[in-house]
Amino acid sequence: MTKNNWQTHKFGGTSLADASCFRRVARILHGESGTRQAVVVSAMAGITDALLDLVTASEQSADVIQPGLARLSGRYRGTVEALLDDSATWVAVFEPFESELNDAADVLRAVSLEHSAAHQNRDFVAGFGELWSTRLLAAYLEQDRPNDPANRKVRWVDARELIVVESGELGPLVLWERSRENCARQFPARSGEIVIVTGFIASDSKGLQTTLGRNGSDFSAAIVGALLNATSITIWTNVGGIMNADPARVPEAAVIAELSYSEAMELAYFGARVIHPQAMAPAVDCGIPMYIRNTFDPAASGSRISGNPEPEEGIKGITAIDDVALVNLEGTGMIGVPGTADRLFAALHHANISVVLVSQASSEHSICFA
């Protein structure tokens, strides 16, 4: 499939912690090559956790609602006032923020009355952080447009009107046909522009808000990149790339410049938490290279993940999983009895336990798993 001239970028919460971080993101986008940028954005650092903590606390008492929302409002207002120069732009950003803050308060009060939060209520409240951060970034980029060498128009897109998913046993499943129809409406053929897209949130098949789970903004970026058939997907984070070892344990650890999709998935699964393996799937299916780069050191090249990395000799990386239990199930009563393994792994599945290693004796006398 022919690639379009879109580049997809994703900025996480640590990249948008405060006003200075927003300015840094603008400089990065203005300095990147390519005239058409789709920018997927997470909530500001700590906002999603604060919202979810507020949901949990509201189950116990309504007294926490107003103070909790006031703290969030104060932080957001401070960032807006530090970034935006025009009072009219303040109003354009604050009006939806105040409305959504009231919506959050209504839901939290309902949670308090029920002393329980439904999954849909948690998704609804948790998704506000991305709405707030993306609107602010879009407004600041429009204000900073004179500093953009390409002088590109800036647009804001709500991912709930773009990405459609349904829940599956292995997590959210993208309804690609419906999402592509939405993409054709949201991304018509135009000249150069910067489009800011909310990460983490999406809509289900009934049009209700849902979320893509933890690390959902990475998944959002890969989905958007696949929908646009982008030339690249860049994940901007607070580390220089995928390391060949845990730098907390190996001081000499270095960034891996090139690695394959499968290598990145293996390293991610076994502890390299830069990107979630599930988030890579749309990029793998479309053959779109992914880059892991450091927001705070944009000159560094970072890591490139693709289907055709430059070959290297030697070990690519060393990683490990902490807190893993090795269990051995054995007994003479297991020999020749059909269905033992099936019953064992069904029990583990029901307990939501992921198995990373299995070894079975040929005599069927024992099964070892971790």
Image (cartoon, rainbow, N blue to C red):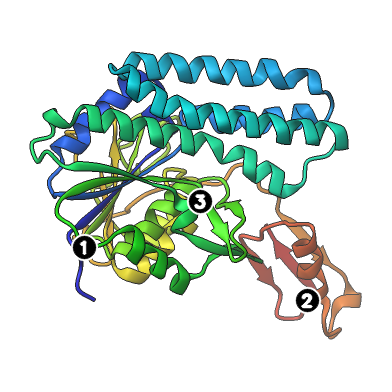
Q: Residue furthest right?
A: 333
Q: Is residue 112 visible?
A: yes
Q: Name the residue under label 1.
A: 189
Q: Is residue 101 above or below residue 218?
A: above
Q: What residue type is labelled 3?
A: Phe
The mark nearer the N terminus, 3 or 2, is 3
Tell me how far mark 3 sits from mark 2, CA to CA.
25 Å
Q: Which amino acid type corresponds to the residue marked 1 in the rendered image?
A: Ala
Image quarter where the C terminus lies is bottom right
> What is the tally of numbered marks visible in this picture?
3
Residue 248 lies, in percent from the top left, at 44, 29
Name of the residue lying farthest toward the front: 88
- Nearest the camera: 47 or 315? 47
Q: Is residue 281 left or right of residue 145?
A: right
For the residues carrying marks 3 and 1, which lies nearer the camera in this image? 1
Q: Give SS at disc 3.
A: loop
Mark whose residue sits in front, 1 or 2: 1
Residue 106 lies, with reference to residue 317, above or below; the image says above
Per the rendering, the mark at residue 213 is none
Residue linked to disc 3? 270
Residue 62 on image: x %, y %: 80, 23
Residue at 64 percent of width and 45 percent of height: 123
Tell me the residue that label 2 is attached to: 342
